[in-house]
Image: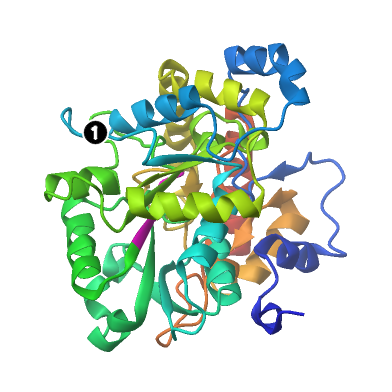
Amino acid sequence: MNPALQRLQAYPFERLRSLLAGAQPPAGLAAIALSIGEPRHEPPAFVLAVLRDSLRQLDSYPTTRGLPALRTAMAAALARRLPAQALIDPDSMVLPLSGTREGLFAIVQALIDPSDDAVVAMPNPFYQIYEGAALLAGAEPYFLNTTPATGYLPDLDAVPPALWQRCRLLFLCSPGNPTGAVLSVAYLRHALELAERHDFVIVADECYADLYLDESDPPPSLLAAAYQAGNTQYRRCLVFCSLSKRSSLPGLRSGLVAGDAALIERFLLYRTYHGCAMPLPTQLASIAAWSDEAHVLDNRRRYRDKFEQVLPVIGEVLPVHRPQGGFYLWPQVDGDDALFTRELFQHSHLTILPGSYLARDAHGENPGRGRVRISLVPALEQCVEAARRLREFVAGRA
């Protein structure tokens, strides 16, 4: 067995199941799940129609590179977030993924030399795939705490130069999971300067990039920041995007990676052996989803409505900030966040996620401790009902 498997921690939702084992919620209250970031909005009907109409094409093996039309649609969707003159070559700069989760894991295996004493830097709290991928690639995770003091952004200037010299990959996530914080163009350009100076790759997890609250201020892409800095070939840049959040299609398992053509070429070789080619019906449905923005605009509106109705209710009893993007709330709670989660489940039949399960002890603190993540993925009516139950629970606890 790979000895690195012993270093993996239980996934947050496994820990949550153990935490709630034996707890008995009120029988008269319907369960409302706010723990997992699984969009529950109705998938776009036109995408499902394409998927149904193309099922006969399951008789063919798909290619790892994907259909030219799929890569073209993906490149066009990315280009809408870039300066007008910026180019993304669909033939050399884009690859389809069977969901970004497998892609984020695989890119670390492809980029890291396990004999190199390599470091993979990542925000803390974080998407647990980052850590697991680093450990199984033989690298050392290095955690960049995101706290109110840092504006919920990883503090790049707090990293010792000697650590940057060992860094081979920096994970960034914007909008952040779970904080919802957005990285500015200036921040991204600073990260790119560090990558150039110390020779590492930036992997930008932009899975929530299409979900933001201010229509006039979308989150900037790492590719846009690179282009504006004169890095028109996106050297050392890889961005990962997904239809799961953008189009409410988590079960389609459809995503993309785009950026540095030299890195994409080597990653394609890895993926040819890795064996995660996207089925043709999924590719055709994905073309439809990446080519349309109207359903994404409606998706944003629906999340905005939830924030507008839920935040005032929860804000009466818990310190909580309005995120810039994503669909999470990240409030402070009194004391033990795991105990809070269990008691809330027992009292109100609400399932949320302890913040400490999403973070690690680093630099003298666990930045998730004393917080919980609330996913506003159910229908609006359920989110409002959940907010009312949460308010009642916290008020009764005081």
Picture layout, residue 89 above or below residue 9:
above
Could you tell whether 23 is left or right of 246 in the image? right
Asked if residue 371 lies in the magenta stretch, the reply is no
**Spot occupied by residue 293 in the image (x, y as percentages of width and height):** 40, 20
Of helix, strand and loop, which one carries label 1? Answer: loop
Residue 147 place in picture, x, y as percent? 36, 69
Residue 252 horizontal side relative to residue 314, left or right: right
Residue 46 against residue 91 in the figure, above or below: above
Residue drawn 65% across the image and 69% down it: 338
Region of the chain picked out in magenta, as a range = 202-207
Q: Is residue 333 visible?
A: no
From the viewer's perspective, is 62 left or right of 74? right
Rendered residue at 45%/30% (across/down): 71
| Position of residue 53 measured from the top left corner of the image (x, y, whole percent) | 70, 11
Q: Nearer the viewer, residue 264 or 320?
A: 264
* Residue at the spot of label 1: 87
Query: From this viewpoint, is residue 240 visible?
Result: yes
Q: Nearer the viewer, residue 396 or 32?
A: 32
Q: Relative to 258, is 229 on the left or the right?
A: left
Q: What residue type is disc 1 on?
A: Leu
Q: Which of the image's four quarters has the C terminus?
A: bottom right
